[in-house]
Amino acid sequence: MPRFKLTVEYDGTPYVGWQRQDNGHSVQAAIEEAILKLTQEAVVVRGAGRTDSGVHALGQVVHSDLSRSWVPYKLRNALNAHLRMAGEKVSIVQAESAPDSFDARFSALRRHYLYRIISRPAPLAIEAKRAWWVSKDLDHEAMHAAAQMLVGHHDFTTFRSTHCQAKSPMRTLDRLDVTRSGELIEIRASAQSFLHNQIRSFAGTLKMAGEGKMTPLDVRLALEARDRAACGPVAPPDGLYFMQVDYPADDASVGVDAEELLEDVGHQE
């Protein structure tokens, strides 16, 4: 059966998250229903990451097997037509033919996320549900300095949800940068995989650093405590965006950390 790789954009606000659930409509279900209407096939689409309710995506990647071949751009256009007719806040940005060895989750080398904070006295109107509004002024340079305490291979018990399903809290964080442009503060994180609520936990802790309530040393000590109580508040989902997934050119898992590949079953943000 031909395998297809889809790059997906969505507004996470109206969904219970990426993964199909009994308690509401999910992004996964929206795409599967569009495929069913188009092809009359009940298929399962598998994503590179399981985003939570309210989390957005510009570059979620999924794969699925269909019974017939499609010209990729025609598949993209047809699925988007069905998604629009259903009123979904989901768009297929790109469709590509993929080898049988490609797996959206397990072939991934690196995932990239963005967390957006708007720091200003006035509440958000246009950006409501698109960013975390913080009424106090934040020192983004202090946030960036604190963020560097978290980069590298660590036990991230402090920064993962108590409901996280991963067997190990060990992860390698490749990048955690904080920049500012006017009122907008951006936190960019890159790693092979993340623990449940890890980036939102980072964002809440870095906000405290931006307020002067934590120093870089405090953040380092919180990491080393391996204690959820040492973490700052978990930031709301509104500001989190799944931006991009990196894959090797041959779609083989070359250069992937074997331990983290096995643990990726717990990947969720």
Image: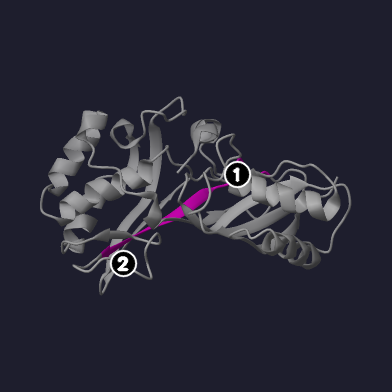
Mark 2 residue type: Leu
- Give x and y (percent) for residue 145: 20, 55
Please give the name of the residue rendered at 80% of the width and 53% of the height, measured from the top-left corner. 37
Residue to which mark 2 is pinned? 124
- Give SS at disc 2: loop
Q: Is residue 123 above or below residue 268?
A: below
Marks 1/2 in contact by CB < 8 Å: the verdict is: no
Residue 36 appears left or right of 248: right
Looking at the rendered image, the quarter that the C terminus falls into is top left
What is the number of the mark on residue 72? none
Please report whichever mark, 1 or 2, sits nearer to the chain's N-terminal start. 2
- Give x and y (percent) for residue 166: 46, 29
Asked if residue 109 lies in the magenta stretch, the reply is yes
What is the number of the mark on residue 254? 1
Residue 123 appears left or right of 100: left
Please give the name of the residue rendered at 70% of the width and 46% of the height, measured from the top-left corner. 102
The image quarter containing residue 106 is top right
Judge the density around disc 1: few (<14), some (14-19), many (≥20) Cα neighbours within 10 Å: some
Judge the density around disc 2: few (<14), some (14-19), many (≥20) Cα neighbours within 10 Å: some
Q: Is residue 238 above or below residue 226?
A: below
Mark 1 residue type: Val
Q: Nearer the viewer, residue 6 or 234?
A: 234
